[in-house]
Image (cartoon, coloured by chain):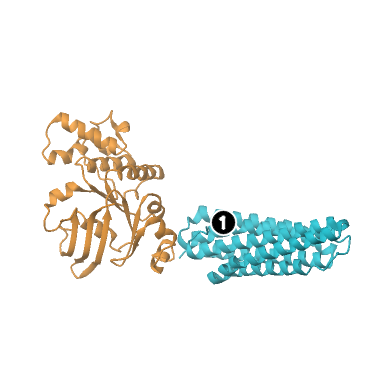
């Protein structure tokens, strides 16, 4: 597998606080990479750095390099284009207060697509891609806010897919969902990795073992261990990883 | 952190040691009953097998409960899955103690045609393997587990040696053929116990290194 994103010696500061320390990591194409670690370890901060969501945070300073297909995302890539290519799904489903159709069409419209036929096609493809077309095809004009939490989250994934990204960042995408909705999102992620590169922050160890190919363990802003998920969860190399995943601290 | 889980793991370890002690005694007594033609002791070994079976079920139940409730990973998962596999071999060793005891009762009816030196040696070597495999588990001793696996060849060689002796015995004392066949079965049980001890040692290695033998 080729490297889709490469992080090289990344350091991130929030004012005086050194939130990410000397991070170097390769994100492989068409794989699911899980970020795990205790709260405040920097995993979400790193995830946000991958599509420059930290840009607007006051006092945030970043050194080092992050590349997408070899292009430096902080120096050589327009931030709007970056976010089209690297989409994000958040912890809490956050549909816009508009119709299901308009939620999905929102991104393509901001990128200049006006044709109704084209938008219809994109909306259907995105909803199918998020495995929610059959449930929603007869109520596309209804408000997205009337959907269940699990449906809202899959709608948000469809919204992210509508601009045809290459990388999907997911920040604890199932932490607010019930077990059935969680399984649906997990199965969806497995399906999506055939076409997309996925990076997922999760607090659910079992979820990481179920769906990710690689796992990265963070502690106090550093990467402690990164490797194949099966190996990291059966035979971790670092005692701190072992202690964390077996619930002895964190 | 995970105080209850750690207590349950300690309990599992305690039950494993308890079952190990039981099978060790069971085999030791079966050997004694065979050598001394002690029917009473042989019957005691047979009666004790039920308790070994009960302990096996208790350990299996505990392991399955831990897998369900604690969703273990890393060393915890390796320990629990190794225990779940080991306990089957330990139970089979208990069965073989009963098998040997049953034959000891049959064999007690006549004096032995010849001294059972090699069988006794085989029993002793098997006991060494069994004890070391259980110690390797308790002490998480990789080196000891590897020694157990290497020791299996000693048992296999002894089995061949005893087999040849018994063939010779049948040739020279045709009327003692039945005793020779019973003794051959006894030695086969020791050879099987050696194999089970090897399996235990392999699971100990898995619990330490994550590597499955073969």
Residue B51 seen in render: no
Residue drawn at the location 14% of the way across and 38% of the way down: A109
In this orientation, which residue lies closer to the viewer: A244 or A209?
A209
| Residue A110, image x, y percentages | 13, 41
Residue drawn at the location 40% of the way across and 53% of the way down: A209
Residue drawn at the location 21% of the way across and 39% of the way down: A162
**Colour displayed for chain A in the image of the structure:** orange
In this orientation, which residue lies closer to the viewer: B139 or B4?
B139
In this orientation, which residue lies closer to the viewer: B65 or B78?
B78
**What element does badge 1 sit on?**
helix
Which quadrant would residue B183 be assigned to in this image?
bottom right
In the shown orientation, is residue A88 left or right of residue A235? Answer: left
Label 1: how many residues lie within 10 Å, few (<14), some (14-19) or many (20+)? Answer: many
Residue A203 seen in render: yes
| Residue B76, image x, y percentages | 49, 61
Reply above or below: A143 against B202: above
**Colour displayed for chain B in the image of the structure:** cyan
In the shown orientation, is residue A180 left or right of residue A137? Answer: right
Report the chain holding disc 1. B
Q: Which residue is mark 1?
A: B63
């Amino acid at each position: 597998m080729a490297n889709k994103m490469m992080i090289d010696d990344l350091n991130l500061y929030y004012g005086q606080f050194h939130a990410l320390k000397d991070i170097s990591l390769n994100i492989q194409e068409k794989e699911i990479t899980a970020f795990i670690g205790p709260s405040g370890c920097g995993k979400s901060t790193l995830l946000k750095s991958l599509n420059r969501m930290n840009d607007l945070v006051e006092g945030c300073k970043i050194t080092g390099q992050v590349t997408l297909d070899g292009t430096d995302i902080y120096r050589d890539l327009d931030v709007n284009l970056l976010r089209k290519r690297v989409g994000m799904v958040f912890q809490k489903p956050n549909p816009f207060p508009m119709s299901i159709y308009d939620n999905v069409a929102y991104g393509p419209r901001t990128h200049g697509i006006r044709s109704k036929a084209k938008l219809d096609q994109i909306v259907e493809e995105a909803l199918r891609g998020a495995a929610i077309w059959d449930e929603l095809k007869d109520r596309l004009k209804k408000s997205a806010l009337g959907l269940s939490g699990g449906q809202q989250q899959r709608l948000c994934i469809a919204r992210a897919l509508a601009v045809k990204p290459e990388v999907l960042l997911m920040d604890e995408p199932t932490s607010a969902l019930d077990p059935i909705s969680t399984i649906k999102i997990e199965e969806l992620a497995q399906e999506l990795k055939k076409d997309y590169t996925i990076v997922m922050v999760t607090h659910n160890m079992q979820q990481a073992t179920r769906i990710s190919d690689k796992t990265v363990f963070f502690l106090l802003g550093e990467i402690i261990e990164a490797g194949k998920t099966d190996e990291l969860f059966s035979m971790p190399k670092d005692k701190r990883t072992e202690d964390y995943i077996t619930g002895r601290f964190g | 952190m995970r105080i209850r889980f750690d207590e349950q793991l300690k309990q599992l370890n305690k039950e494993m040691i308890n079952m190990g002690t039981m099978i060790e005694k069971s085999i030791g007594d079966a050997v004694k009953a065979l050598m001394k033609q002690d029917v009473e002791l042989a019957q005691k070994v047979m009666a004790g097998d039920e308790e070994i079976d009960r302990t096996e079920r208790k350990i299996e139940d505990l392991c399955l409960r831990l897998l369900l409730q604690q969703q273990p990973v890393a060393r915890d998962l390796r320990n629990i899955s190794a225990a779940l596999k080991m306990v089957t071999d330990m139970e089979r060793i208990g069965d073989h103690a009963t098998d040997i005891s049953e034959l000891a009762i049959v064999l007690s009816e006549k004096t032995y045609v010849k001294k059972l030196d090699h069988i006794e040696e085989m029993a002793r070597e098997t006991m060494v393997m069994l004890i070391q495999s259980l110690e390797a588990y308790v002490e998480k001793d990789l080196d000891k587990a590897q020694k157990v696996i290497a020791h299996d060849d000693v048992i296999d060689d002894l089995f061949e040696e005893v087999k040849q002796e018994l063939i010779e015995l049948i040739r020279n004392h045709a009327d003692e053929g039945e005793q020779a066949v019973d003794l051959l079965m006894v030695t086969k049980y020791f050879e099987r116990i050696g194999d089970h001890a090897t399996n235990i040692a392999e699971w100990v290695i898995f619990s330490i290194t994550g590597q499955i033998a073969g």
